[in-house]
Each structure stands twice: as structure tokens, then as C-alpha cells.
Amino acid sequence: MTQIRFAVAGARGRMGQAVIRVLNERELIVATTFDKGDAIDLSQADAVIDFTTPAATLALAEACAEEGQRRAKPLAHIIGSTGFMPEQIAALEAYGSRNILLRSGNFSLGVNMLMGLVRQAAAKLGPDAWDIEVLEAHHKRKVDAPSGTALMLGDAAADGRGVNLNEVRVAARDGLTGQREPGTIGFSVIRGGGIIGEHSVLFAAEDEVITLSHSARDRTLFARGAVEAALWAAAQSPGLYDMQDVLGFR
Ligand SMILES: NC(=O)C1=CN([C@@H]2O[C@H](COP(=O)(O)OP(=O)(O)OC[C@H]3O[C@@H](n4cnc5c(N)ncnc54)[C@H](OP(=O)(O)O)[C@@H]3O)[C@@H](O)[C@H]2O)C=CC1
Ligand SMILES: O=C(O)C1=N[C@H](C(=O)O)C[C@H](O)C1
């Protein structure tokens, strides 16, 4: 089998550096790396690993599609960037007809496993007795909130209850908020120091609380998952995929 050639976007960033380390450790081919302001040349790459920003990811999706037109096999675009607005997600997903597009707010096995547990718990613990709250904590340099992972966990909880997260989401509380509305899913955010990524989903009833949580100890974890995802994606057809597909959890 021919070896997959990788491009790394956001190469000087925290995740870009971790991805390059993992690719080198695994003796995989790093064909090109680029950052903000660099020209994007994907002519030697089969898969692009992208931990940048929503705007950079959208531009890269277009570059992948244009490069894909020049060859028989489309490019795999592995997207770890978070903080997308709904209209940006729609624009990005349109590239699923031209690129192999795999996006996840968290590439760890643990969080993807947790999503299934949260969905299952939310399906059993109804809104009359159980309130769902998602808590997350990250380092002080993170620029988006709630985290992509928190939103994935919120989505899993909403899915378990058969509702749309956008219709039940409470993003912030401050001042005279009034009592909690039954059926809502609240999000709380902490930013500080070097915290890699802490996520919990609380199911709170009158007399008991269940907490399902995940703690990331090293961001290499996400880089390893993204490289696995890219190796998997390179063998797929154009379409929209996520880490649940890679792990066979769907
Ligand atoms: N899905 C997952 O498992 C994970 C997702 N993330 C997400 O990944 C993203 C990046 O995180 P992190 O590495 O910590 O952030 P950093 O700020 O450390 O890195 C982002 C990098 O992207 C670069 N960049 C910005 N714009 C462009 C552009 N137009 N083209 C190419 N590169 C560009 C930045 O360059 P410059 O500094 O010059 O602007 C920077 O080097 C965030 O959205 C974060 O939430 C993080 C960890 C895990
Ligand atoms: O910005 C980060 O650092 C992280 N971002 C992702 C997110 O938004 O969920 C994943 C991880 O928690 C680290």
C-alpha cells in the first residue's frame, strides 16, 4: 500500500506541534507544514491535519477541493478546529461532496466513549426529575467557549432526550436569572493556567447527582487520535465523518 503523505496546518500551534511529533514518532511522511500567512501547497499531500481556526479551516476546505480536482483521489481533511458558528458548519459540510471531511471537537477515545454513556443516561433520566449540566475547564489561551467537546457532550445528551440542543441550551447565567427551566441543558466554563481539558456532565436530581467525566492529561492524546483518524479517512470516499465512525461507535 502507498504511504499516506500528511500536511499539517497550524504547524507552529500547540496542536500542530503535537501532531508533527506524533507523525515523526510513527515515521509517517510529513509532506508540508504551514501556518498563518504561508502559501498553502497541497500538491504533495494526501491528508491534511488541521487544528487552526474556523476561518482558516474553511479556506483550507476550499484548497483541498481545488487540489482534489487535479487528481483521481480526493484529499482527506481532518478538522480539529473548534468555535464554528452554525453557518460556518453548514458551509464546511458542503465540502463533504468533494473532500473526505472528518471533523471532531475531540479526538480522544475517552470522550468519544463518554458521548455514548451520556446519550444513554440522558435517555433514561427524564427532565421531570433530572437536570443536565455540562462543565468544562481549559487553559487560559483557549479562545472559544463552550469547548467543542462540551458542545459534543451537550449534543449527545440532547440526542438521548430526543431534543435539539439549540432549543434547550443555556450558555451563561448571571444576575437575577429566575429558576432553572426543566429540560434545559446548561453550560459552565472555566479558563485558567495550563489545564489541558476537563469535561463533566452532571445529572442532578433532588437527592442525588450522577457525574460522568473525562480528564485529558496531555494534548498528545488528541494528536494521536487525529493521526489515526487521518489514516482511516484516507481510505474512504468523499463524505462527512467523525471520530465515532473511526472508532466504529456509530
Ligand atoms: N478536536 C480536538 O481534539 C482538539 C481541538 N483543539 C482545537 O484546535 C484549535 C487549535 O488549538 P491550539 O493548537 O491549542 O491553538 P494555537 O493557537 O496554539 O494554534 C493554532 C495555530 O493555527 C494557526 N493559524 C491561524 N490561522 C491560520 C491560517 N489561516 N492558516 C494556517 N494556520 C493558521 C495559528 O497561527 P498564529 O498563531 O500565527 O495565528 C497557530 O499556529 C482550537 O480551535 C482548539 O479548540 C485543540 C485540542 C484538541
Ligand atoms: O483548545 C483546546 O485546548 C481544546 N479544545 C478542544 C475543545 O474545544 O473541546 C478539545 C480539548 O478539550 C482541548
Image (spheres, rainbow, N blue to C red):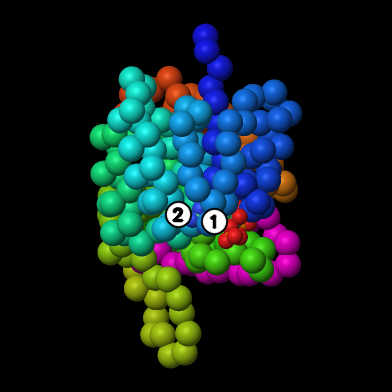
Residue 107 lies in quadrant: top right
Q: Is residue 189 left or right of residue 218?
A: left
Is ligand 1 within 8 Å of the beta carbon of the residue shown at mark 1?
Answer: yes
Give the camera-side residue of 145 and 19: 19
Point out residue 246 in the picture as x, y percentages from the top left corner.
47, 28
Q: Is residue 125 left or right of residue 135?
A: left
Q: Quadrant of the C terminus?
A: top left
Residue at mark 2 to residue at mark 1: CA–CA distance: 8 Å
Q: Secondary structure at mark 2?
A: helix
Residue 94 lies in quadrant: top left
| Residue range highlighted in magenta | 184-206
Q: Which residue is mark 2?
A: 56
| Residue for point 43% across, 90% down | 176
Foreground label between 2 and 1 = 1
Q: Amino acid at mark 2?
A: Ala
Q: Amino acid at mark 1?
A: Lys
Is ligand 1 within 8 Å of the beta carbon of the residue shown at mark 2?
Answer: yes
Q: Which residue is mark 1?
A: 36
